[in-house]
Structures are given as C-alpha cells and as structure tokens.
Amino acid sequence: MDQSLDLAIREISKVVLGKQTQVKLALTCLLCRGHLLIEDLPGMGKTSLAHAIASTLGLQLSRVQFTSDLLPADILGVNIFDSEAKRFVFHQGPVFSQILLADEINRASPKTQSALLEAMEEKQVSIDGETYSLPDPFFVIATQNPTHQSGTYPLPESQLDRFFMRIQLGFPDWQSEKTMLMELEEHTLDSINNVISSEAQTRLHQEVLKVSASSAIVEYILRLVTYTRESEDFPNPLSPRASKSLLLAAKAWALLAGRSYVLPEDVQAILPSVAEHRLRSAYSDSATSHVFSDLLLSRVDTLAA
Amino acid sequence: MKATNAKAQLLIGISFLLLAFSMLTTVMTWVLVLVVISVALQALPFFKVDIHHPSVRTINLFAILCALALAYTTWQAGLMIAMVNLLVMACALKILQMHTTRDYFIVVCVQFFLIGCGLIFEQSIFYAGFLAFVATLQLSSVAFHISPSRPLQKQIWLSIKISLQAMPICVLLFLVLPQLSPLWKMPSSQSKQTGLTEEITPGDIANLSQSGDLAFRAQFSGNIPAPHQRYWRGLVFEDFDGKTWRISEARKKMKRINYRLGRKTSPAYDYSKEFKYDVIIEPTNQQFLFALDAPLTTTRRTWLSPDFQIQSTIPLVTKFKYSVQSYPNTPLKGASDYFDVNMNLQVPETGNPKTKAWVRELRQQHRSNEAFILAVETFFFTEPFSYTLRPDLMPFDPVDTFLFDKQAGFCAHFSSAYAYIMRLAGIPARVVGGYQGGEMRKEQYMSIYQYDAHAWVEIWQPGIGWIRKDPTGFVAPDRISYGLERALAYEESFLEDSPFSLMKWRNTAVLNEIRLVLADIDFFWSKWVLGFDQERQLNLFRLLVGEIKPIRIALLLLAILFVISLFLLLFNYRVWFPKINNYPLHFYLKSLKYLAKQNIVRARQETPMAFYTRIAQQLSVQQRELFLTLTEQFNQVTYQVQTPSRERIKAMRQTLKAFKKSL
C-alpha cells in the first residue's frame, strides 16, 4: 500500500519541486480527512500543490478566489426563480465539490469566511431552510497570505482550529528551482496521473486508524498538550481536539513511513503543522516560522522522566 | 507576592484569627479588633476587592502608636501577657504588609510561636487538639504558598500526612527531652484566681456552685471513701469580722515562719484506715491543695501546714499532680494547741446582738460543752431552716437575720452562723472551705467540680483536737450523701446560670455518657501527658537502662537518635530506592547515565533514535552497535508492542550490561 502513497508523492512532486516534506504533510492531512491550510507568500506554488493533490487523488476540484466582496451565496449556492417551472431552483455553489480550493481565504470578509468554515465542520449546507449535504470526501484546501499583508482579514483562533493542519511551502532550493526553470514545459498539471483510487483512499484511511500508538506515545502527546496548558509561555493552550489531531496525524505519518506503529519522531514531525496555528495568536506575525512548536518540543522530554 | 498566593494568605489569616480568639482571656480586646481588621483587609484581594493598601510608612507609624498604647494598657498585667499581646499585635500589622516571601514566612514562624504561647495559658487536650488544627491550617497555607494550584483537600491531607509522620519523633522527644523546671515563672498575682478564695462571705460559695467546671480529679488505689466521707479539706478561715471569714493574718505569718524554718507538721497518724490517691488539680493561681483528712504527702514542691492543709510552694498556674495518703482516724491535733485555741475564740465586739443574747441565754442553761452543742444542733433541726442557692441578701447583722428571720441559706450561712455561735459560747471554732462530694467514674477516678464547693466547721475539743461539724448536714442531709443537685431538686436552681453546661443534662443518658467520655479523655490527657514530669521521666529511664549513670543516659539518647534517624530513613526510603514501573525506560535511562559520564548528553527533545544518530560517531564500533541494539530494543518495547514480554526486558538488561562493560 505504501507503494501507491510513494507514487502519489512522486506524482505531486512533478509539479511542486523539492517540497517532499510539505507534500507528505499535505497527504497526511488528507489521509486523516482533515482540512488543509497552506500559508505562504503569493507565487510560492500553493495553488499548484492543491491542483496536483486533486489530480493525484482523482477528485473533482473547484476553486474560489476569495476577495473582499465575495458573499456567502457565491460559495454555497443560491435559490433562483425559474420562470418556466414557476418555482425556486437551487443552484449549487462551488462548495459542492470533493476538493474546494479556497484561494486567499483571508482576503474575504469574516461573514464569508464563517459560511465556509461552517460547511467544513458540518459537511452540509443549509439554505432557506433546506439542507444539502456535501459530497464525500469533502476537503477544503485553503491558502492564505501572511496576515501582515494589506487587505487581509485574519482568521480567528476558533476558525483556525477547524483546519487539521497548516503548512508552509517556503522558497525552493537552488537545484529545484533550476530544474523547474529548465524544464518549464514538462511540469504542467496535465502530466499528473490519478494514482490513488477513491476505494484505495478509503482503505488507507482505515489503515491509518489501525496504526498502533503505545501508551508511551499517548503520554508523550499528553505531556505536550498539558505543558501548553500549564506554562505561561503559551497564550493559546492546545484543546483536546488538537491532541486528537496530533495522534491521528502521527499515525498517518507513521503509515507514510511504512510503519505500523508510531514513534516519537512521527509526533515531532507533524507537531509544527498540526499545533502551530492553534498555539499562536491570530495576530502574531510569524508566518513562516514555528516559534511555539519549537519551544514546546524543546521544553517537553520525549521520554517520561 | 503574586496574586496566585492569595489562598496562602487567606489561610494564614484565618488561622491567625482562630489563634488570636482562642487566647481571648490573654489578648486585649483592642488588639483583637486590630487582628480582625488586618485579616479582613488582607483577605479582600481574595474576594476580588481591590483596595489601596496602607504604605509601609503608615504601618510603621501605626506600629509605634500601637506599641505605646500596648505599653499603657498592659503595664499592670505583667510582662508575660504584655509580650504575648505585643507578638499578636506585631503579627497583625505584619499581615498588612506581606509583600515578599520573606514577610510571609515571618508571619508563619510568628504564628507557630504563638501556638506555643497559647499552651502557656491552657493545656487541655481539647485546646491542644484545636491548636493542632490551627497548625494544620498553617501548614496547608505553606503548601499553598509552594504549589498554589492544588485543591484545598489535597493540601490539608498533605499537612496531616506530614504531621502524622512527625508524630513518632514528637513522642520520642517528649519522652526523652529533659523536663527542665521553668526558667521563669508566670507572674501570677495579676492572673485571675479560680475556685475557692481567701475569704468567705455567706453567698460567695453559692456563686461558685453555679459553675460546672472541673476543680480536680482523684485516682484512688485501694479503698474509695463513701460519699459522706468525701470532705476535701482546703482552706481554714479563722478570722471573723461579723460578716466575712478570712484566713487569719497571724496564721499566714506563722505559716511563713514555719515554712522558712523547714518545720514540718506531723500529726500522730493513726494508720488503722487509709485512703491512697493521686490528685490532678486544675490551675487555680493559688497555693492550696485539697486532700482528705489527715493527709501525708511526699510529692515535691508541697508541704503540710500547721492547720493540716497541704500547700504547694508555688502558685498553681498549670495542672498539678500530687500523691496523698490520708488517715481519716488521725486526730487533728498539733504539738501546741495554745495558738489554735486562742485565735479561734476571737469574735467581733459589735453586731449581731440577737445572736449574742440567745447564746448567752442558752449557755446558762447548758453548762457543759456537749450539752450546749447538742442544744444548738437541736435548734437547727427543729427550726424551719431550709437549704437554698437563692438566699436573700443579709447586709446588716447577717447572723441575726439568718438565724431568726430568713432561716434559709447556703452552706456558708450555716457554717458561719454555727462557728460564730460556738465562739460566742467559748468553744474554739473555725470555718473550713473545700469541696464535698465527687463523682466516681468506673471505679477509676473521681471528678470534683466547682459546684461541689462547700464550707463546714471545725470545733476544738480539749484532748481530742479539731472535730468536723457540718451544720448543712443537719438541714439538708441529701447534700452530703447525694450531692448538690439532689439537695436542690425542689427549687431547680442547680446550675441555673449556665443553661448549656453538659452537667445540667446529667439525667439524659446519652448526653451524660458523652460528658463522662469527655471526662475520661481529659483524665487520660492530664495523667499521662501533662503529668509526665521529671520524676516519671527518670522512672522511665530507670526502666530502660537500670541504674542511672551518665554513660547509660548518653547511650540511651544515642539509641533514640538512631531510632529517629531510622524513622526518617523509613519515611524517605523511596528517595533512595525509587519504585521502577517501567523497566525498559529505566534501562534506557541508565545507559544515558553511563553516556553522560563520557560527556555525551541527550537533549530533552531528542528521540532515542535521533540521539543515537547524533552521537554514533563519538562511540567505538562495538559501543555503537550495542547502543543501537539497545535503542532499537527500547523503541520496540516502548512503542511497538503494548505490553513488553519478560524475554524482551531480559534481553534489554543483557544489552545494557554489555554496553556498560564496553564503556
């Protein structure tokens, strides 16, 4: 089974060069059925990554570019009067797709943001008293500009918590960027094949749940979250939802590494992506670093002592 | 101090409040008010009320003023009480400026000292229990100071646990620490005297009879006296001014001289009948001790005065225990009678004309002493006298009023009148104060309460000595045989001023049982804890080491120190031998310790494998392999399988051994 995962990583890496770890993290997030937030400067390949993932998994993708005048109806859909049928007909919005790419989510007004985030949590949409369920699977991959850029409405902590993971891409290294520039033609989204079928995705999700986490691992995670709750250095302590996410992500990471059990290394690897956006305050200006996660990891002993 | 320690401050405030109010009789009222105000002020932050705290300068100025006020108000009360008040006052002011950890610990220490001060004034087991409670509160406060977020029950439980651990050490120290005589004495003249006083005015003992407080307890070995034999002799009143009986100044002077010269009174004891008992007397701030006639005692710091009264050489500021043998058949007769006889014929020249006339007339009819006494007693029997706790006031010519007008009174009225009549008739007589009766508990000990206070008369018979006469018995025989309550049953005046006294509910079986059990506990405490003196300590030493020699005492103390250290060792053995729950982790940590000796230290966030990768180059090939094996085994046992099998742990232990050797 890890063959298909390896294959998927290779496929995505065709488009997003030199970002092996970020690609693995994104896959981890989707294996856990969590929503992904990609945060970075414009032009770093956020959208490409989302497209590549959709193609690899063979999922239907729709994209919404968030702007400050975007309204909830533009995402969710709207009832329009059909003059021939003489009744209102619901026109589905872009949210009715398997992967919704919410580009620059922090440029939309809070009202629109929360409409999307409600859909993320409930996996259904209610319009004019009528409830419509969203397709399964339903992932949101949102991209976000660093909050200090102009024209942004930062997501509040409560809504950041809905995202299972937040990753940053960062600049590519010299070699990758050179390859990218030299072979500009080859690395298009069309070249990506669908390597993981939807059945395989379901099976992989089941397997993630089966990965064993010993009590030593659970205690390590508990020590980590408890430390954030007791120390004064962490303004936003980690919630039980966060600890659940940590465990699940560590399991998926272990599966990606081809193991059937979780090691502390797995927890350490996924912690910055799962915990950083929950730990920091929405206004803190540390878009590209893992200040809180690094601090937390350095404070908590891996071994029970 | 941080706001998180508001709990510690509140708790220390509460314990201080309790402590100050438990010393109600010692601490001045205005100091108590100061305590309440300062505790309330420092408790306000806990209830989220912010006030502007007085500055240090204000408090210092206030402290000086308070010290002056204290000096003014307590200068007559004696040094001891002034000092305790000063301590309480200083603590109250210090509470107002608990800013630093140092301030807080000063308050804690002062309060522990105050607990010791509390024990100077009161030593009952219930008060000791109360102080133990206060000490627990203080320890809990310290616990809050150290770890503010633990819940209150856990803190209290921790304090109790620590105190219990200290208990065996405390008992050992109690048993072996030298029982030194006090380096200073309580200035007693200013203290309130309790119990019988140095003078009797009819009506006085009636007040005492309203008190259900304990006077003393006696533990008999052998015979127990019957109720009508329980005359606990105390004070002898030989000076009468027509109203009040006093201890005669001449007698006091004579006693002083005798005491100074070391003259002992030894009546001709008649050993045919004997009562043997130990008495534990409550503090009275006086020197009289009580005993049955005629007493003989060997207890230190006591002596037998010429009026056959046992006296303590110092005022009784704490409970005091003494052993007595009484020989009831011994005639109360000293070596020289002249002094006794002359002193006890004195009567005031004026007052009570009716009585004088009546005695003169009666004496003419009955020339012999026996006949006269009989006639007087017949008078008491035949006239309608009644025994009451609520006698009318008799301000002028009290004996006249009592004998011929009111004819109702308490023991002091009867005794006073009887002794006066005898003196008028030329028969030497004196009033004796003490206690009559006592409540026997389980054949073990007898409790004598303040309401058992009684007064009777002794008259002089030439050749025989002093003979006890109890005129109260003529009128109210129940008082002698069954006690005060029964004698007063008809007027329901028994303890009517203290409606909440348990004594009052003696007829309710359950409450009476509670009262008696409380009395048992108090007796046990008085006998074994408060009564543990130098003599008993020496006896204990003798029991342990035989003949007392310095070397043996030194060895004994060393042995005790050893036992105490052993206790401490036992309490803390987990520090040296921690319990191992997780062997794989234990082994791995051990290997880390070996490596740390080579200056190879794991960082906290490093996982075992990451650590190995980092340090692999610093190890030799053999070491590297062994450590890799160990790391892998640890990872496997810790993260891969749910419960490690015995074999794997064994394998890990072997790898660890090999690794240790390789280093």
Image (cartoon, helix red, strand yellow):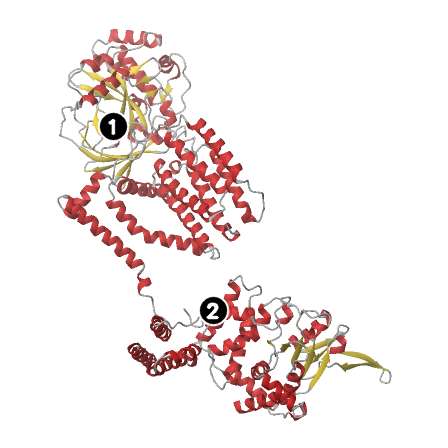
In this view, A134 is above or below B188: below
Tell which residue pokes out farthest to the right in this image: A83
Residue corresponding to mark 1: B313
**Residue drawn where x is 58% and y is 43% of the image:** B52
Figure quadrant of the C terminus of chain B: bottom left
Check disc 2 and give the amino acid type.
Val
Q: Which residue is mark 2?
A: A300
Q: Nearer the viewer, residue B327 or A88?
A: A88
Tell me the SS state at disc 2.
loop
Between circles 2 and 1, the one closer to the viewer is 2
Q: Secondary structure at mark 1?
A: loop
- Left or right: where B25 falls relative to B416: right
Going by the numbered disc 1, the residue's amino acid type is Thr
State whether discs 2 and 1 lie on one chain: no
Q: Residues within 10 Å of mark 2 (few under 14, many from 20)?
A: many
- Mark identifier at residue B84: none
Looking at the image, which residue is at 39% across and 33% down? B83
Relative to the observer, which residue lies in front, B224 or A107? Answer: A107
Residue B565 visible within the image: yes
Instruction: Provide residue B130's location: percent of width, then percent of height.
Output: 39, 44
| Residue closest to the eye, B363 or B528 | B528
Q: Local crowd at mark 1 within 10 Å, few (<14), some, or many (≥20)? A: some
Residue at image location 25% in from the left, 45% down from the top: B175
Subunit that carries the residue with mark 2: A
Which percent across, then down, holds residue B148? 48, 55
